[in-house]
Structure formats: C-alpha cells, structure tokens
C-alpha cells in the first residue's frame, strides 16, 4: 500500500527510508539547505532545513527525519521562518560574511568590483559574491548584519600557500559539506571537522600542501560559502560575467563532463557537471585546474616541417601527406613493426581508439601504447 505525507497541504507519496527532504525535493517543494550534499549520509549541522510537524513541539531537521505515513508538515510556517532567520543571523554575525544584502550604499552585481588587500590577501568584499548559498538565503529571508557589529570571527589566518586552493576560515560556517565531499564522494580522507578546534583540519592541522590532499577540488565545489576558493580564478571569475559551456574533459579518456566558465572568450574556471555520467560532478586535479596549457605561448598552432635544419610553417594537408609518405616508406622497407605509436592522454577516448585502430588495422602492428600508463 502506498504511504503518504502532507507537505504544505499537498499529498506526497514516499518510499520507506526516504527523508522528509527527499520527499519534498521529489515533489518540487523548496526547503532551503546549507549542509545537505547529495549522495552522502545526512550531515544535519546547519539547521536551516528545519520544518514543523503537526503535533510536535520542536522543529525537526528535514534532512535527517525519516518520512512516516500520516505526517503533516509545514515548511514555511511562522515558527519555521523565525528559526531560519535566527540561524542565518548567527552565521552572518559570527563569520566574515560581508554580503551587503539590504544595507545602505550602491552595491549591485552590475557595478561590483572585488577589492583585495594585497598585503595579507584578505578580501574587502567576498570572493564568491553572487555565487554564495548563504548570501542567497540571507537575501531571501531579508537578514542583514552590520559588519561593525560582527563578533567572534575565527582568528585563523587565511591559508594562501596552497598552489590551487585558498582556505578562508573566517568565512567557514562548519557545515561539513567539504568534509563529506572529501571523505565520502572522492574518498581522499584528507580533511576532518575538529569540534574542539571548531574548524576543518587536515591531519596535524597542516596546510593542504603539506597534507595528503590531492587537490581534486571537490571541497571547493561543495562549499556553499567563500571559505574555499580556486586560487586561479579568485580575482577574475564572477558568475554574471561568464558563459557556461559543457564539454568533455580532455584528459585520460574517461569522459568526465565539465562545465567551462568562459569570460571574454577565455576559460576562467571549471566545475564538474552534476548528475552527468560518468563523473557525476567529480573531477580530478587535472580536470578541474589543468586548463592553462590551452593558452600556452609555446603551444604549436601551425604544422612545422624541417628543411635544411630549419623549421618552416606548412599546411595541414602538406604535413599529413609528408607523414603518411614517410610511414609508407618505412613499412615497405623495414616492415610494420618498425613503426610504434604513443597515444596522448590529453585527448578524448575516441581519439585513442582511432589511434590503436590505425596501427593495428592499417599499419598491421601492435606497437601502440598510451602515455597514461606512465
């Protein structure tokens, strides 16, 4: 027999074991979250997903509460809204969250400029302004904090020594998403949440570069605030300035789906495409950060042919004809095993397949390898 719960006077079927949040999501009923991360065990730290159940005195966390037949749930009651505002007020007042939600001054996306203290790397305005879940919720619930009244800011300095990731402990809300992403999604187990220190730490509380972090960047993609930021795009990327283009990662041939964030015709950031196979949002260090080679001045853009000890530019047809002719000559004189090929890992899987077919089916040799093995 199908079982149901009522959410905001709407009847919603559920499967045994589903949480209230799961059921709400399936029925397109919005419940705000900050610590929820898909496909990992419920974290239940932020409290922003609290809902009211008829007959219960206390609010419950929808991300951990298991749906039970006959539940009557309110996601936007006066009591719920009051609780969410209190939680957001706490987050904003105990961290460096200069969101400028409704305060005075002409601060808008169209005229926003990032200001940076070059001496210590601290930001006068948030580096993820416009792409922050906490800011979105503060705006939605009209919660604004005077920066002059902020108290209890974490004293840990910003961690800038890592080559790819900036850690700003003053913006961390201890939601635990980065820890879940590291331990349960990527299973790197490089970071944990230390309740005694009140911060996310590596083993020995060392910098990421001195830990067993592999810099996959999954923690950055999971972070809902500005506590974790890509170093390369920190002063450049703004969501309203960029175009998103989906593509396939050029490394290793697995076929991971990437979202390129392109600004002024240049890639400034890469994220994994959520819910897309085969990676489902995951990327490795190369896929997330290794796009600089595209713009290398040393990259050849025109075929070169050496004549009399000097290179000259050539057309693709001329270069390919020369290579094909040389290969044919070698095979006729010394046999097919005189040739060998190495397929590049910085190419798509289909290209590597065609490469081995060329050597095995056309050249009639098995002398074909792939540089990923090295």
Image (cartoon, helix red, strand yellow):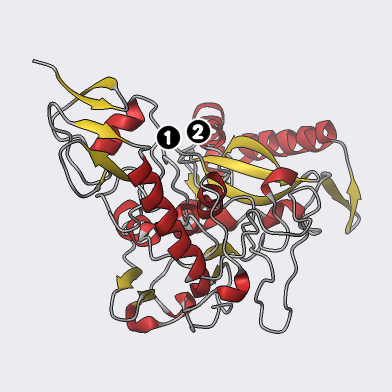
282 or 340, which is in the foreground?
282
Total numbered circles:
2
On the rendered structure, is 89 left or right of 113?
A: left
Whole-percent x, y for residue 238 in the image: 70, 51
Can residue 361 be seen here? The reply is: yes
The label shown at residue 353 is 2
142 or 230, which is in the foreground?
142
Identify the image quadrant of the N terminus: top left
Residue 183 sits in quarter:
bottom left
On the rendered structure, is 266 left or right of 103?
A: right
72, above or below 201, in the image: above
Residue 56 sits in quarter:
top left
Residue 3 sits in quarter:
top left
The residues bearing labels 1 and 2 have C-alpha atoms spaced at a distance of 26 Å
- Mark 1 and mark 2 residues within 8 Å of each other at the beta carbon: no
Q: Residue at x 79, y 47 (%)?
A: 110
On the rendered structure, is 260 left or right of 216?
A: right
What residue is shown with label 1? 275
167, above or below 243, in the image: below
22 or 95, which is in the foreground?
95
Q: Which badge, 1 or 2, is on the more N-terminal residue?
A: 1
Near mark 2 (Cα within 10 A), the count class, few <14, some 14-19 or many ≥20, is few
**Which residue in the rendered view is the most extreme toward the front?**
78
Q: Residue at x 50, y 78 (%)?
A: 151
* Element type at mark 1: loop
Whole-percent x, y for residue 313 in the image: 90, 46
312, above or below 200, in the image: above
Whole-percent x, y for residue 300 in the image: 79, 51
Can residue 374 be seen here? The reply is: no
Q: Residue at x 56, y 31 (%)?
A: 358
Whole-percent x, y for residue 240 in the image: 71, 44
């Amino acid at each position: 027999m199908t079982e149901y719960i009522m959410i905001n006077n709407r009847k919603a079927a559920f499967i045994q074991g589903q949480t209230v949040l799961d059921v709400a999501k399936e029925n397109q009923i919005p419940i705000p979250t900050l610590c929820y991360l898909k496909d990992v065990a419920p974290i239940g730290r932020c409290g922003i997903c609290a809902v009211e159940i008829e007959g219960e005195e206390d609010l419950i966390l929808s991300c951990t509460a298991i749906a039970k037949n006959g539940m009557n749930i309110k996601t936007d009651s006066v009591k719920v809204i009051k609780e969410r505002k209190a939680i957001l007020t706490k987050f904003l007042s105990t961290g460096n969250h200069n969101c400028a939600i409704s305060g005075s001054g002409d601060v808008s996306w169209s005229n926003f400029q990032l200001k940076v203290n070059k001496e210590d790397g601290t930001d006068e305005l948030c580096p993820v302004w416009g792409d922050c879940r906490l800011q979105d919720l503060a705006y939605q619930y009209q919660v604004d904090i005077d920066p002059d009244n902020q108290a209890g800011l974490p004293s840990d300095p910003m961690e800038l020594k890592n080559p790819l990731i900036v850690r700003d402990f003053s913006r961390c809300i201890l939601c635990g998403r980065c820890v879940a992403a590291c331990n349960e999604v990527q299973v790197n187990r490089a970071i944990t949440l230390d309740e005694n220190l009140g911060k996310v730490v590596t083993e020995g509380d060392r910098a990421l570069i001195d830990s067993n972090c592999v810099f996959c960047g999954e923690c950055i993609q999971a972070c809902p605030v500005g506590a974790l930021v890509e170093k390369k795009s920190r002063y450049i990327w703004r969501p309203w300035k960029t175009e998103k283009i989906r593509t396939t990662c050029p490394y290793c041939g697995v076929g991971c789906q990437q979202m390129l964030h392109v600004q002024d015709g240049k890639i400034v950031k890469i994220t994994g495409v959520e819910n897309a196979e085969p990676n489902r949002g995951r990327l490795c260090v190369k896929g997330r950060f290794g796009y600089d080679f595209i713009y290398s001045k040393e990259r050849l853009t025109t075929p070169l042919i050496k004549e009399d000890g000097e290179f000259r530019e050539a057309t693709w047809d001329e270069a390919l004809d020369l290579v094909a002719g040389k290969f044919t000559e070698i095979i006729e004189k010394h046999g097919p095993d005189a040739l060998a090929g190495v397929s590049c890992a910085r190419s798509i899987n289909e290209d590597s397949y065609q490469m081995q077919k060329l050597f095995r089916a056309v050249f009639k040799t098995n002398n074909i390898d792939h540089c990923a093995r090295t």
